[in-house]
């Protein structure tokens, strides 16, 4: 047998996405530990059972946990369980569930999304009210859920009182509250609060719990905080192709993150690197950091020619081509040296 050949340069770093990063060594070790002997398939294993206990401790109550492969899968299956066929979900217009999931909520789950423009990616009770209407009117999809992205696609972070206000307004209308927590760890790191403080304690009913963006590999979970808010999840996960046969390997990764503080340490580090990056470029000529740095994302505007020169060394994406806004993402494995080299590349590019 031919030896495995590495097909990429492990020294290469980008600032394109936290999805570009590899798997955290502690998560890889947990996978290796789980890879011995036999365990019952489809979730009836020791790792998934322990994960349910651990997440119950994080959220301060008994929870139902449904490990899945992807964030899109978590959102689609969760919203499917929270809405009847005639239901709709209100979301921010910038939310990942609306902009970056290829229409999966509509095409796979049959969920009508009602997007609301927001200045900073965060919904408010007032913004919710712009789409939460028409109850009993058969010509309008019924707004029966709201989905909040924490942290938002614009890098901002909901404070507990902001979530509580939206949840109160939603529940008063008979709506359920879903949280897309793909970067929920980054929010906890910013807020300096336990997970329960801005989820179960303030009215969130169902969470899509992130793992992949924080050092796991194809490992996310749906966490049900209020069983009355989600129906048929056990069946929907299967019919929507998110049921893992060897589920212990998904659960073992999430255990590596959440049964201890790896989830928080990794997010704190990624956030700190984003702050270092923002501080490094803020005073450069022609560079403007245009959004608050409240997670592991930095949004900036710089001349297009300069951005293209930097991309020859470090890849990243445009956010808004019309304005020249770009997005720079840090990850658990971003080092201070990576950031400093990137800042140096930006400085050289903008100075010509």
Image (tube, rainbow, N blue to C red):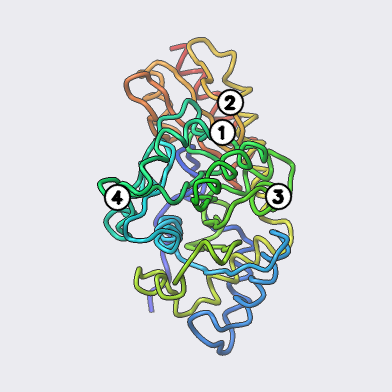
Res 103 label: 4
Check disc 3 and report its element: helix, strand or loop: helix
Cα–Cα span, label 4 and label 3: 33 Å
Q: Nearer the viewer, mark 2 or mark 3?
A: 2
Q: Are marks 1 and 4 in contact (CB under 8 Å)?
A: no
Res 156 label: 1
Circle 3 is placed at which residue position?
Answer: 265
Q: Are marks 4 and 3 in contact (CB under 8 Å)?
A: no
Indicate the position of residue 59 as horizontal and vertical percent values: 69, 59
Q: Is residue 253 above or below residue 291?
A: below
Q: Is residue 37 above or below residue 28?
A: below
* Quadrant of the image occupied by residue 34: bottom right
Q: Residues within 10 Å of mark 2 (few under 14, many from 20)?
A: some
Cα–Cα span, label 1 and label 2: 7 Å
Indicate the position of residue 287 as horizontal and vertical percent values: 50, 15
Q: Is residue 235 above or below residue 223?
A: below
Circle 2 is placed at which residue position?
Answer: 292
Cα–Cα span, label 2 and label 4: 29 Å
Question: Looking at the image, is mark 2 or mark 3 earlier in the sequence?
Answer: 3
Question: Looking at the image, is mark 4 or mark 3 earlier in the sequence?
Answer: 4
Q: Residues within 10 Å of mark 3 (few under 14, many from 20)?
A: some
Cα–Cα span, label 3 and label 1: 19 Å
Indicate the position of residue 166 as horizontal and vertical percent values: 56, 40
Question: Looking at the image, is mark 2 or mark 4 earlier in the sequence?
Answer: 4
Left or right: where does residue 263 sit relative to residue 319?
right
Check disc 1 and report its element: helix, strand or loop: loop
Q: Residues within 10 Å of mark 1 (few under 14, many from 20)?
A: many
Quadrant the C terminus occupies: top left
Check disc 2 and report its element: helix, strand or loop: loop
Check disc 4 and report its element: helix, strand or loop: loop
Q: Nearer the viewer, mark 2 or mark 4?
A: 4
């Amino acid at each position: 047998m031919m030896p495995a050949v590495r097909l990429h340069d492990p020294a290469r770093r980008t600032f394109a996405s936290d999805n570009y990063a590899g798997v955290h060594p502690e998560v890889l070790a947990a996978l290796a530990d789980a890879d011995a002997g036999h365990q019952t398939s489809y979730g009836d294993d020791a790792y998934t059972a322990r994960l349910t206990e651990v997440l119950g401790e994080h959220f301060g109550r008994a929870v139902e946990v449904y490990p899945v492969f992807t964030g899109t899968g978590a959102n689609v299956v969760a919203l499917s369980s929270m809405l009847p066929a005639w239901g709709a979900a209100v979301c921010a217009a910038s939310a990942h569930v609306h902009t970056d999931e290829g229409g999966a909520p509509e095409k796979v789950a049959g969920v009508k999304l009602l997007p609301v423009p927001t200045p900073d990616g965060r919904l408010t009770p007032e913004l919710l009210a712009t789409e939460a209407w028409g109850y009993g009117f058969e010509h309008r999809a019924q707004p029966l859920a709201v989905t909040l992205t924490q942290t938002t696609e614009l890098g901002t972070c909901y404070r507990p009182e902001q979530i509580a206000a939206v949840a109160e307004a939603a529940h008063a209308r008979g709506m359920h509250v879903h949280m897309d927590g793909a970067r929920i760890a980054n929010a906890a790191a910013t807020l300096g609060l336990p997970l329960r403080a801005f989820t179960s304690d303030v009215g969130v009913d169902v969470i899509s719990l992130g793992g992949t963006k924080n050092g796991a590999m194809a490992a996310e979970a749906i966490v049900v905080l209020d069983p009355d808010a989600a129906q048929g999840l056990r069946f929907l996960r299967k019919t929507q192709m998110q049921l893992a046969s060897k589920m212990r390997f998904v659960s073992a990764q999430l255990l590596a993150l959440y049964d201890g503080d790896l989830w928080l340490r990794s997010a704190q580090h990624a956030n700190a690197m984003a702050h270092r990056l923002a501080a490094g470029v803020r005073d450069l000529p022609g560079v403007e950091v245009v959004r608050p740095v409240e997670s592991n994302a930095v949004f900036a505007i710089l001349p297009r020619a300069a951005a293209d020169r930097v991309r020859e060394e470090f890849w990243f994406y445009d956010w808004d081509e019309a304005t020249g806004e770009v997005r720079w993402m840090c990850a658990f494995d971003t080092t201070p040296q990576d950031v400093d080299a990137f800042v140096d590349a930006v400085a050289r590019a903008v100075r010509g």
